[in-house]
Image (spheres, rainbow, N blue to C red):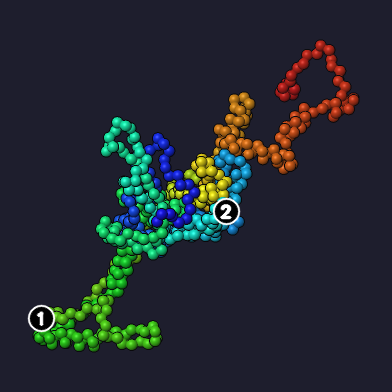
Amino acid sequence: MARLFGFSIDDKDDLPKGVVSPIPQTGEDGVDYYIQSGFSSQVIDLEGIYKNEHQAIRKYREMALHPEVDSAVEDIVNEAIVSDTNDSPVEIDLDNLNASDGIKDKIRDEFKHIKDLLDFDTKAHEIFRNWYVDGRVYYNKVIDIKKPQDGIQELRYIDPMKMRYVRKEQKKDDKGAQLFNTSNVHESEKVYFPKIEEYFMYTPEPRYPTNMAMGGAGTAMKGIKLAKDSITYCTSGLVDRNKGTVLSYLQKAIKSLNQLRMIEDSLVIYRLSRAPERRIFYIDVGNLPKIKAEQYLRDVMSRYRNKLVYDSASGEVRDDKKYMSMLEDFWLPRREGGRGTEITTLPGGQNLGELADIEYFQSKLYRSLGVPESRIAGSGDGFNLGRSSEILRDELKFSKFVGRLRKRFGKIFLDILRSQLLLKNIVTPEDWEIMSEHIQFDFIYDNHFAELKDKELMEGRLGLLGMVEPYVGRYYSTEYIRRNVLRQKDAEIVEIDEQIEEEIANGVIPDPNQQMLEFEQGAMGDPMAEMGEEEAAPAPQPQNMPCLLYTSDAADE
C-alpha cells in the first residue's frame, strides 16, 4: 500500500542534521524492528510452551475469570479508579504549566471533550480493567478528513488481539541518513542510519500461524495498515527483555494460579475418595475351585450389597446394583485354613480440615498480583485506621503501586489530548513537547492512609510553628517560616495571600492589622477619656518623702 489509512499530524521522521546514530530508537512498547515487508507475531513463553501474543492475551483473560484473581484485580481497579456521584474520576492538573489562562481554559475544555468521547465518567472501571488485564489498550481516533480542524469526532475501542504495532526497516537499497560522510572513507566502510516506518496493522480476524512464530515458512499476515497518529496506544510498561514482548501484570501470577488450581483439585479428589469409611469383607470360600469361588463371592456380594440410589429428577428411590462405585466396600475371598469370614473397617481420611497448603498458595497468588495479604478474603486483620506509624508497610507499597499504574494509564489522555490540540491548532508541535512535561492528571484518591499521613504532617508543622513564632522578627523571617516550617511552595504562597486578601475584603475574616491596632489602643488606654477632671488632676505628693517598698511580711509587722 502506498498510503496508510487514518491521518498523520507530523510526517517529519527524519532526524535533524548532525543528530544521527546507528542504534535504532527503542521504546517501552516491546516492539521489535522487522526487516523489509510483512511482520510476524511476537512469541512469549507461558508454562514452558512458546505461544504468540494473541494467545497470551487470551490466557490473561482466562486468568481474570478465576475467583481469586478477579478479587485481586477488583481491589486494584477500585483503588485506582474511584467512582463518585458528584466528581469525575480524573481531572487535568495545569498548575505547573507555564501558559496563559486562555490556553489553560482551552486545554481543560478539550480534556473534558475527550472524557465525553470515552464516556470515561461511566466506563472508567471497565476501561482501566481491560488495560490492566490485557496489558495494552488501543483506540482509533476518528476525524473528518475534510475538516481536520474540527478535531477528534469519535474514539473507537479496538480489541488488542486484532492490532499490532509494527516498526519496519527500509530495504538496504534505500539509503537513509548517512552517518559518516567523509571523502577519505571508502564507500564500503560508510555506515548508514536505517529509515524506520512505523504503523499499526489491524486484522479483523486475527490468525497467527504457529510455523511463522517459530521461524518456519508461512503466509504473511494480511491486514489494514493504519497511520501511527490515528491510533492511541498505551501498554502496561512491563516488557520481557529476552523476547521483547509486552506483558500484563497478570504474567507473574500464572505459575501461582496453576499451583493453586492443582492443589485445590487434588484436595477435592482426596476428600471424595478418603472421606467415607469403607469395609473389607473376607469371605471364606473353602476348597472351591477358582471359578466357583468367584461365583460364590459374587452371590454373597449381591445378597448383602445395598445399592439404593435417589433419583433427583423423578423423586424415586430405586435399587441400582449394576454400577460399582470407587467408594464402595471391598470383597476379598479367603481359602480354607484362614480365619474364616471376617469384616474389618478402613478408617476415613485424616486431617481433612487442614487448609494450610491452600492458604499458602492463596497468599502466594496475592503476593504475585501485588495485593496486600491483609486484603485476602477471610483475613481478620482488616484496615488499621490509626496513626500512620501503625499502618502496614504492605499497604504503603500497594498505594505506591496504584500510583504508578495511574501515572502509566494517564498516557492515554496525554496522547489523545496531543492530537486534539494539534488538530485544532491550539498549540504547535514544538510547544507541545515542552508543555506535555508539565501536564498531570489528578485521580480521585480513596486511600485513607495518605489522608492520615497528611494530617499528621500538618499537625507536626503547626506544632513547630507555635514553637518558633516568638522568634519571628528576631532570628527568623516570616518568609523563612512559610518556606521551611510550613513547607509552602511559591505558587501556594501567592495563592494563599490572594485568598486572604479576598476574604478580608469580603468581610469573611477580620483584618489582623486592624485587630492589632485596636488591641494596642485598648492595652494602653486613654486616661483623659476614662477619667473625669477631678480624677485626672494629679494628687499632691509629699516633699522629700522616701519611696519605700514593703513586702507582705513587712506590712504585717
| Residue drawn at point x = 55 percent, y = 44 percent | 427
Q: Tag 1, which secondary structure?
A: loop
Quadrant of the frame with the N terminus: bottom left
477 lies left or right of 272: right
Label 1, residues with CA under 10 Å away: few <14, some 14-19, many ≥20: few
| Residue drawn at point x = 16 percent, y = 81 percent | 333
Q: Residue furthest right?
A: 533
Label 2, residues with CA under 10 Å away: few <14, some 14-19, many ≥20: some
- Between 342 and 169, the one lying in front of the other is 169
| Residue drawn at point x = 57 percent, y = 49 percent | 424
| Residue mark closest to the camera, 1 vs 2 | 2
**Residue at which label 2 appears:** 150
Residue 417 percent across, percent down from the top left: 53, 50
Residue 223 percent across, percent down from the top left: 39, 60
Quadrant of the frame with the C terminus: top right
- Between 257 and 538, the one lying in front of the other is 257
The dot on residue 345 is none
Residue 488 percent across, percent down from the top left: 58, 36
The alpha-carbon separation of the residues under discs 1 and 2 comes to 102 Å
| Residue drawn at point x = 30 percent, y = 61 percent | 219
193 lies left or right of 422: left
Q: Amino acid at mark 1?
A: Gly
**Residue at which label 1 appears:** 337
- Viewer can see residue 24: no
- Viewer can see residue 54: yes
9 lies left or right of 110: left
Q: Tag 2, which secondary structure?
A: helix
